[in-house]
Amino acid sequence: MSKERNQTSVSELGEFGLIDRLTKDVEIKNESTIEGIGDDAAVLDYKDKQVVVSTDLLTEGIHFNLMYVPLKHLGYKAVVVNISDIYAMNAIPKQITVSIAVSGKFSVEALEDLYAGINLACEKYNVDLVGGDTTSSLTGLVISITAIGEGQKETIVKRAGAKPTDLLCVTGDLGGAYMGLQLLERENEVFKVNPKMQPKLAGYDYILERQLKPEARQDVPAILKKLGIVPTSMIDISDGLSSEIMHLCKNSGVGCSLFEDKVPMDNQTKQMAEEFSINPIVAALNGGEDYELLFTISLDDYEKIKNDPDFTIIGHMTEASEGINLVTNAGSAIPLEAQGWNHD
Ligand code: TPS
């Protein structure tokens, strides 16, 4: 009998380990492929323009719960999370393709709602829906979107490129989407026990919107251009600040000091974190789904950015040997654990 091959389960390896393992034999064969797997989007060079391509898959029960997510919102969010990856390359999304796998029992009207959300996002972000596929599913709804965008060779920004003295900056505020999710999950549990109970959502419109109808930072490439800044590295925050910092550091070969007191958080995020007895920094670090942009700039660009209300400087990069550290409000530096969202 042949000796059994050592088996590793998917959850043992984790998402990033799984991607590394499955793509270890992939080789680039075409000159037009500038950047392959490993960034927010692939970069393709077609003479005077560079094309960026990114894809994302959303699965019912893992990424969304139809008990409390309206299908129109789901369609909108599915587009937003994909084109956010294009903005993260400092590029402009132009086209998407949408593929779905759906049970034959699903109502066509419900799917029309999904597509109404998709179309609304396409309108808002000036993106064309140019293709896709529909197939059946024996389990839940699956949505896969591929986004295609345009960038210029000189201004496309990758995860690699941060230098040890660069400043670490972020747009918007963090942790809101996660606290919105916690609130929705809590009220859904109450609903399951007693459907007559009114959900207690009042006063939390901002974090609910951050979870249910996030927006991508469409404005950022233009603002950076106006300020005359090309970031040295950039990524969008889908898994959480800690794991995105880890990606920038790993791809750039640098370390980082992140300052807890600088991480921007909305009051509703802080209030809901208090209700759940969790430290709000944990929501920002590990919650994910904020779809803000995290980037590094040269120290020389400090004067250009320091008064811009769109950005917050939350730390600086260091030599790799110094590691990735969180400087807490109490002033101590602790190693930052990259604990991005895990679907287990
Ligand atoms: C039912 N969630 C969904 S996608 C994602 C996170 C944090 C980001 C990264 O995903 N479960 C339900 N609803 C949610 N919104 C979440 C979990 C949270 P990936 O790395 O798979 O692209």
Image (cartoon, helix red, strand yellow):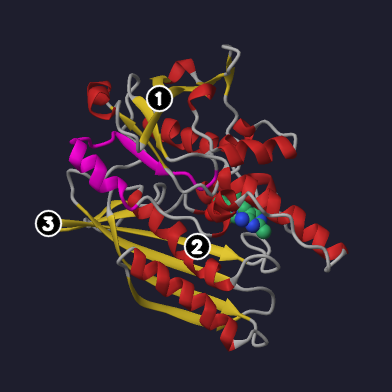
Question: Which amino acid does the dot numbered 1 rest on?
Answer: Val
Name the residue carrying label 1. 254
Q: Are marks 1 and 3 in contact (CB under 8 Å)?
A: no
Name the residue carrying label 2. 77
Label at residue 22: none
N-term-proximal mark, 3 vs 2: 3
Residue 30 is situated, as x and y percent measured from the top left of the image, at 25, 58
SS assignment at label 3: loop
Q: Is residue 16 visible?
A: yes
Name the residue carrying label 3. 48
Q: Residue at 64% of width from left, 87% of height from top?
A: 104
Task: For the N terminus, give its image quadrant.
Answer: bottom right
Question: Which amino acid does the dot numbered 2 rest on?
Answer: Lys
SS assignment at label 1: strand
What is the distance, in whole Å, between disc 1 and disc 3 at their CAs? 31 Å
Q: Considering depth in this image, is 150 or 170 the residue closer to the camera?
A: 170
Which residue ends up furthest to the front in the rendered image?
A: 203
Question: Which amino acid does the dot numbered 3 rest on?
Answer: Asp
N-term-proximal mark, 1 vs 3: 3
Judge left or right: residue 167 versus residue 229.
right
SS assignment at label 2: helix
Residue 324 versus residue 333 in the image, above or below: below
Please state the extent of the stretch shown in magenta in the rendering. 218-239
